[in-house]
Image: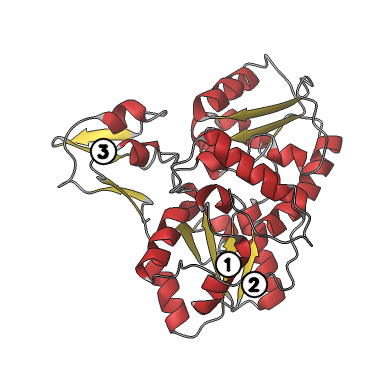
Amino acid sequence: MKQAITTQKVNCQDCHRCVRSCPVKAIGIESGHASVVLDKCILCGKCVVECPQQAKQVENQLDIVKQALSDGRKVAFSIAPSFVAAFQNLSFGQLRTILKGFGGCAVEETAVGAAAVSEIYASLLESADYPVISCCCPVVTRLVEKYYPDLTRNLAPVVSPMIAHGRILKEKLGSDVFVVFIGPCIAKIAEGRDDDVAGSIDAVLTFEHLQSWLSDTSAIKQNIPEDNDALDTPGPSRFFPITGGILKSFTDHDETDTDVITVHGIQNCMEVFECLSQWEISPRFVEALACDGGCIGGPGIPSTSGTPVRRARVVNFARQSADENLNYFV
């Protein structure tokens, strides 16, 4: 199976920063070069971020997307709501204009899929008689499956917003539509190939891949017109990219409520899972996101802004109602 993260050995300078930064010790050394050990890797992307020589390379499916467009296929784009944390001076309406100009037939927020997923989580929160672990984050899912297999049964029986939105788009636009997800997460590249959700997503790009595409085509210009026609995005589901955002999309979470836990960052997630495995805690629901601050800390975000700034952008964007002007500038 193709790996989402590979090593360009010629660039690897034997600095071992990736070895030290990997939270699950999934980096092996062979002939002086550091490579990802696929069976251990959870695709958090820390090695990619830490490598000073860019020896760790992320699979880029942009050529696949361009080929689909060139072939005249119906191509629909699903954009993660964390895009406002990645692109400071580009509104969603302008991004729609650009991607439709590339040949896309539809451009929607993945928050549409998140809204559908939220309904299931709300039901689980009320009815489950065991601790439910959210599985919107593919890194968390891989972490549980590989390192806490006894908790696999606790993973929520629901697909991620990416998969849900892919299925919604194919139902609405036809099974032949080519769905492209664009977001901040490297693990989504592998999730799109998982056998149990095969056919839901046809390609995955990170925001860095998108930025490169936009730069190469000189698509980012001044006065890009807004395309906000027929947008249908429930505001609360736009909170998904931040810590506590899943819960906020369907409930008023009290942070002092020990029945519900929100956790972000891999080490913090591992601590919670260890406590769950030892039966030291028994919450009804655990919202777990692997990246610091949530998806806004993803390895595929090109923004240099700090986490508080990224969070503020997402929160402000999420608070806008679906029928308001979607301009967003900070």
Extreme residue in the top direction: 280
How far apart in space, not on screen, are marks 3 and 2 (Cα)? 39 Å
Residue type pointed to by label 1: Gln
Is residue 188 shown left or right of residue 14? right
Task: Name the N-terminal-most of marks 3 and 2.
Answer: 3
Is residue 151 shown left or right of residue 203? right
Residue shown at the point (64%, 34%) measured from the top left? 243
Residue type pointed to by label 2: Asp
Does dot 1 land on a helix, a strand or a loop? helix
Task: Name the N-terminal-most of marks 1 and 2.
Answer: 1
Q: Which mark is residue 17?
A: none
User: Vertical placement of 144 versus 177: above or below?
Assistant: above
User: Vertical placement of 276 versus 320: above or below?
Assistant: above
Q: Quadrant of the N terminus?
A: bottom left
Residue shown at the point (56%, 42%) measured from the top left? 295
How far apart in space, not on screen, are marks 1 and 2 (Cα)? 6 Å
Does dot 2 land on a helix, a strand or a loop? loop
Residue 113 in the image, given as x and y percentages of width and height: 69, 57
In the foreground, 143 or 98: 98
- What residue would you read off at disc 2? 227
Q: How crowded is mark 2: few (under 14 residues within 10 Å), some or many (20 or more)?
A: some
Residue 26 in the image, given as x and y percentages of width and height: 35, 33
In the foreground, 148 or 11: 11
Q: Residues within 10 Å of mark 1 (few under 14, many from 20)?
A: many
Q: Residue 52 carries which label?
A: 3
- Which mark lies nearer to you, 3 or 2? 2
The total of numbered circles placed on residues is: 3
**Do the residues bearing badges 1 and 2 touch, measured as CB atoms within 8 Å?**
yes
Residue shown at the point (81%, 31%) measured from the top left? 129
- What residue would you read off at disc 1? 94
Is residue 163 shown left or right of residue 25? right
